[in-house]
Amino acid sequence: MKKSALAPLIVFVLASFSSTDNFPAQEYRTLTVADWPLKFVRHDFDAFCYSTYRCAVRYNGFTFADDPDDKLQISSASLGSGYPDNLKASYLGVPNFPMPADVSWRSADGTAHHAEVDIAHIFAGGLIKHNAKREDIAEGVSIANPEIILEVNDRTINVYMRAHIPMKTLQIPGNRYSDYRADLVLAWSKTY
């Protein structure tokens, strides 16, 4: 292709990406405490299974757990004081909201279960669940996508949110790396 033929093509491509219809401003803005109440348009996700057989969690076209049928997964109690803080999301940037999470598993007693967990319904309104007071949140500091974590624990499904909230003061005096809160907040739970 000749150089002169590229110019109109480049202008056409750039023009098509400048429309706010293609890229809504709220999806790409920086979230700060000035945007109170804190809302999110993307989230990170992961799933964990404890005391289950054949646990499978599918969300946004991906499989997050697909455990064997003949092996009982470890219990959350076996993790000691590290649980539930060990739960972290590793799948980044999921737009709000895909179809419900599809969960199938057998509880520790061998009973088969299936559930659809509607993440959009649990987080209706897109509000970030956190334990920080507005007046304690640092101003002018970006707030990243929150984490949504689905846990299957024997007969119970729990859905948590963790948001990294920048704070004005250190949360652990003397620890310069503790200028934030990242509390794991239980948003929804159901026993089957």
Image (spheres, rainbow, N blue to C red):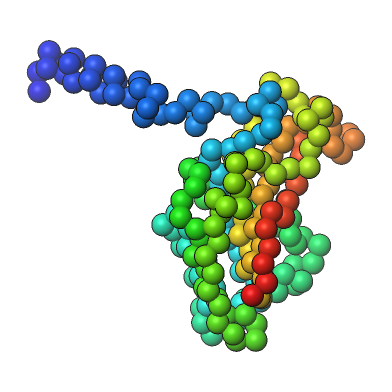
Which percent across, then down, holds residue 139? 73, 22
Q: Is residue 12 above or below residue 26?
A: above
Q: Residue at x 73, y 51 (%)?
A: 185
**Image quadrant occupied by the C terminus:** bottom right
Viewer-nearest residue: 179 or 112 = 112
Q: Residue at x 67, y 67 (%)?
A: 190
Viewer-nearest residue: 59 or 166 = 59
Which percent across, then down, holds residue 16? 29, 24
Which percent across, then down, holds residue 149? 62, 55
Which percent across, then down, holds residue 69? 51, 82
Q: Residue at x 61, y 48 (%)?
A: 123
In the displayed orientation, state which residue is furthest to the left. Answer: 2
Q: Is residue 64 above or below residue 24?
A: below
Dividing the picture into quadrants, the one containing residue 163 is: top right
**Image quadrant occupied by the N terminus:** top left
Dividing the picture into quadrants, the one containing residue 156 is: bottom right
In the displayed orientation, state which residue is furthest to the right. Answer: 173
Left or right: 24 as drawn, with respect to 132: left
Residue 71 seen from this side? no
Viewer-nearest residue: 26 or 184 = 26
Left or right: 143 as drawn, with respect to 22: right
Dividing the picture into quadrants, the one containing residue 6 is: top left
Residue 77 seen from this side? yes
Left or right: 28 as drawn, with respect to 82: left
Q: Is residue 180 above or below residue 159?
A: above
